[in-house]
Image (cartoon, grey):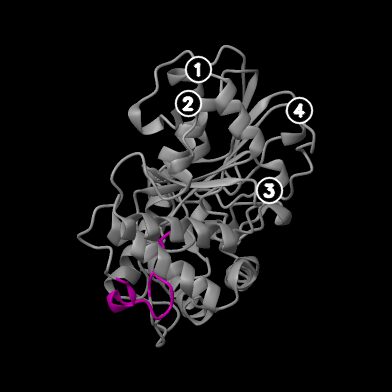
C-alpha cells in the first residue's frame, strides 16, 4: 500500500465506542466497593447503595428537588418505554425522530401502543425536524441527542413553559455532557453505559411533578408488563425512587456506576464533564472541517453533538465508487485500526448511512482523540491508494 506515512503515536486508551463507552480515566476493578456484593438488593446495604447512586445522579445532574429519580430495568430502553406505556394515550401525542432510536419510539407508538391521535415527525440522519410545529397541547416524545446521527436539539425554545402536554425525553447520550432544561422536561431517561461509561442494563427515570400527576391520575387502556408497573394502590410507588427496584438489579454494576459518579464529582461535577466533552468534540469537528474527504453528518453547526460525532466520506474518488464499495470504506478503516490496536468500535451505527462515529464524552481523554485522527487519515489513504 502507498500513501501518507503510518503514524507512530497510538491512543493510550483506544476506546471510542458510543456505548458502552470508555471507562473513566484511572478506572480499575479495585476502585469498586464490594460490601454490597453477595447481598440482597433489599438488604440495608443494598438499598443504601442504590439510593446513593440515585442521590449522586441527582446532585451531579442538578435535578430539581421536587423531581423523582429512580432506577429502572432494561437500560434507557426500559426507562423510556416505561414512560411511554404509563403516560401516553391521555391526550394527542407527537413522536419526533431523526435517527435510529427515535424511530424505535415511533414504532412503539404506532404498532404497539397504537395511539389513536398520533403525529409522527421525522427527519433524515443529520437533520432535526421542525419541532416548533408540535402543538403545545400534545404530549411529545423526542431524543435530546441523536446517538446514531450526532444531531442534537439546539435549544428548548420550541417547548412552552406552560404547555399542557407532557414531554418524554430520551437523553441517554446527552446527560452529563449537555445541560438539561429541567423545568420543561417531565420524563427524562438515560442509561449508565453511555456518557458515564458504566455497565449496561440499568436505566434511570426522572419524573417531574407534572409527570407524577399524570401517572397517578391516568390508567392506560393497554396491559402493562410487570417491569412497567410503577403504581401501587393507585399511586406512584415512591419506593422505586428511594432505592427499591422493580426487579433484581446488579449491585456490581451499581458499584461501577457509583465509582464513575464519584470520579465525576472529584473533577468538578457536571460542568467539568461538559467541558471535557466540548473539548474532545471540538478536536473532531475541526478535523472534519479541515479534511477534503470528510463531511460532518450534521450540517447545522448549532445541532452538532459533543458526544458521538458522526461523519461521512466525500470527494471525487469516494463519490465514484459503487454503493457497495462506498459502504465498505468505513468498515475497512475500523478493521485496519483495530488490528493495530489504535481504535476500537468507532464505526457508524448499522442503520445509519456509511459513516464513522467517534465518542467524545468526558471519559475519553483529549490526547487519545488527537492521536486517533491521523490514523483515520492514514487508513483512508491506504484504502484509496491500495
Q: Earlier in the sequence, mark 2 or mark 3?
A: 2
Label 2 vs label 1: CA separation? 8 Å
Residue at image coords 29%, 54%: 43
Q: Is residue 136 above or below residue 17?
A: above
Q: Could you tell me residue 20's position as x and y percent?
A: 38, 58
Label 4 vs label 2: CA separation? 21 Å
Label 4 vs label 3: CA separation? 17 Å
Residue at image coords 45%, 61%: 52
Q: Which residues are magenta?
A: 14-33
Q: Earlier in the sequence, mark 4 or mark 3?
A: 4
Q: Could you tell me residue 135's position as x and y percent?
A: 75, 25
Look at the numbered disc 2 and give the secondary structure of its residue: helix
Label 4 vs label 1: CA separation? 21 Å
Marker disc for residue 182: 3
Q: Is residue 23 magenta?
A: yes
Contact (Cβ within 8 Å) of mark 2 with mark 1: yes
Amino acid at each position: 500500500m502507498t500513501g501518507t506515512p503510518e503514524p507512530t503515536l497510538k491512543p493510550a486508551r483506544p476506546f471510542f465506542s458510543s456505548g458502552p463507552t470508555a471507562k473513566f480515566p484511572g478506572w480499575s476493578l479495585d476502585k469498586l466497593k464490594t460490601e454490597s456484593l453477595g447481598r440482597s438488593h433489599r438488604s440495608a446495604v443494598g438499598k443504601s447503595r442504590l439510593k446513593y447512586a440515585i442521590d449522586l445522579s441527582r446532585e451531579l445532574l442538578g435535578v430539581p428537588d421536587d423531581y423523582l429519580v429512580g432506577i429502572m430495568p432494561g437500560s434507557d430502553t426500559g426507562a423510556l418505554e416505561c414512560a411511554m406505556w404509563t403516560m401516553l394515550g391521555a391526550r394527542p401525542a407527537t413522536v419526533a425522530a431523526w435517527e435510529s432510536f427515535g424511530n424505535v419510539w415511533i414504532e412503539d407508538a404506532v404498532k404497539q401502543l397504537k395511539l389513536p391521535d398520533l403525529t409522527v415527525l421525522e427527519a433524515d440522519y443529520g437533520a432535526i425536524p421542525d419541532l416548533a410545529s408540535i402543538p403545545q397541547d400534545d404530549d411529545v416524545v423526542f431524543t435530546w441527542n441523536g446517538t446514531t446521527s450526532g444531531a442534537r436539539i439546539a435549544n428548548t425554545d420550541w417547548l412552552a413553559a406552560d404547555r399542557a402536554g407532557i414531554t418524554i425525553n430520551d437523553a441517554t447520550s446527552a446527560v452529563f455532557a449537555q445541560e438539561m432544561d429541567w423545568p420543561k422536561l417531565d420524563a427524562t431517561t438515560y442509561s449508565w453505559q453511555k456518557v458515564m461509561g458504566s455497565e449496561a442494563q440499568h436505566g434511570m427515570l426522572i419524573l417531574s411533578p407534572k409527570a407524577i400527576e399524570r401517572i397517578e391520575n391516568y390508567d392506560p387502556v393497554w396491559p402493562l408488563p410487570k417491569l412497567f408497573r410503577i403504581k401501587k394502590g393507585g399511586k406512584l410507588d415512591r419506593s422505586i425512587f428511594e432505592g427499591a427496584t422493580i426487579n433484581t438489579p446488579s449491585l456490581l454494576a451499581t458499584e461501577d456506576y457509583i465509582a464513575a459518579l464519584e470520579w465525576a464529582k472529584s473533577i468538578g461535577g457536571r460542568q467539568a464533564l461538559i467541558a471535557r466533552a466540548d473539548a474532545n468534540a471540538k478536536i473532531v469537528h475541526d478535523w472534519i472541517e479541515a479534511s477534503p474527504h470528510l463531511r460532518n453528518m450534521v450540517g447545522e453547526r448549532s445541532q452538532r453533538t459533543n458526544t458521538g460525532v458522526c461523519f461521512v466520506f466525500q470527494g471525487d474518488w469516494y463519490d465514484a465508487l459503487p454503493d457497495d464499495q462506498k459502504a465498505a470504506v468505513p468498515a475497512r478503516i475500523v478493521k485496519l485500526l483495530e488490528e493495530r490496536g489504535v481504535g476500537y468500535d468507532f464505526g457508524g451505527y448499522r442503520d445509519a448511512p456509511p459513516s464513522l462515529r467517534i465518542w467524545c464524552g468526558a471519559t475519553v481523554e483529549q490526547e487519545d482523540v488527537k492521536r486517533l485522527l491521523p490514523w483515520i487519515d492514514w487508513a483512508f489513504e491506504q484504502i484509496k491508494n491500495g
